[in-house]
Amino acid sequence: MKSYKEYDREFIGDSDIAALIFVGTTKDGLKANILNFGCDGRYNAYVVDENAKIGDHYTLEMEFETSSGFKAWLKVYDDEGLTADYSADKIKVYRAGDFGCIIQLIGKKD
């Protein structure tokens, strides 16, 4: 396993209201979540796979998957619209502090 810090950080949005919207598939259908940040600005997330060692200071905030055998998906929206789009067997979003964010893609096939 390698540290989440060894993975690339990707832009996930800008916001003047310090929040992004995460929408994705769950076993029960679609779910929308709001992830608040410490202040207005530009946000990035580490995008990791199932082999990442995620620090204990991160907490699991949301999880996306399907029960139908299809890939789960996650779309991230900022004040202007869609900023990021992910798919994998399972997707987990972790949070630390006011700005730390990790998006874990489990079972992603390129």
Image: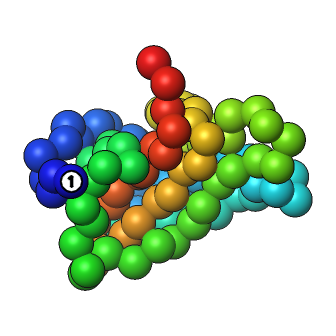
Q: Residue at x 36, y 44 (%)?
A: 49
Q: How is the image coloured?
A: rainbow
Q: Nearer the viewer, residue 16 or 44?
A: 44
- In the picture, residue 13 is in which quadrant? top left
Q: Quadrant of the C terminus?
A: top left
Report the side of 87 relative to 105 (left or right): right
Q: How many marks?
A: 1
Report the side of 11 relative to 91 (left or right): left
Q: Secondary structure at mark 1?
A: loop
60 w.r.t. 13: above or below: below
Q: Position of residue 38 (x, y in %)?
A: 31, 73
Residue closest to the far front: 1
97 w.r.t. 101: above or below: below
Q: Position of residue 90 (x, y in %)?
A: 59, 48
Residue type at numbered disc 1: Met
Q: Position of residue 56 (x, y in %)?
A: 26, 80
Q: Residue at x 33, y 60 (%)?
A: 101
Tell me if I can see residue 19 in this picture. Answer: no
Residue closest to the far top: 110
Q: Nearer the viewer, residue 24 or 21?
A: 24
51 w.r.t. 101: above or below: above
Q: Position of residue 95 (x, y in %)?
A: 37, 70
Q: Residue at x 27, y 65 (%)?
A: 54
Report the side of 15 relative to 33 (left or right): left
- In the picture, residue 73 is in which quadrant? top right
Give the residue number, with chain letter if any, for mark 1: 1
Q: Residue at x 77, y 47 (%)?
A: 66
Tell me if I can see residue 9 in this picture. Answer: yes
Callout 1: 10 Å neighbours few (<14), some, many (20+)?
Answer: few
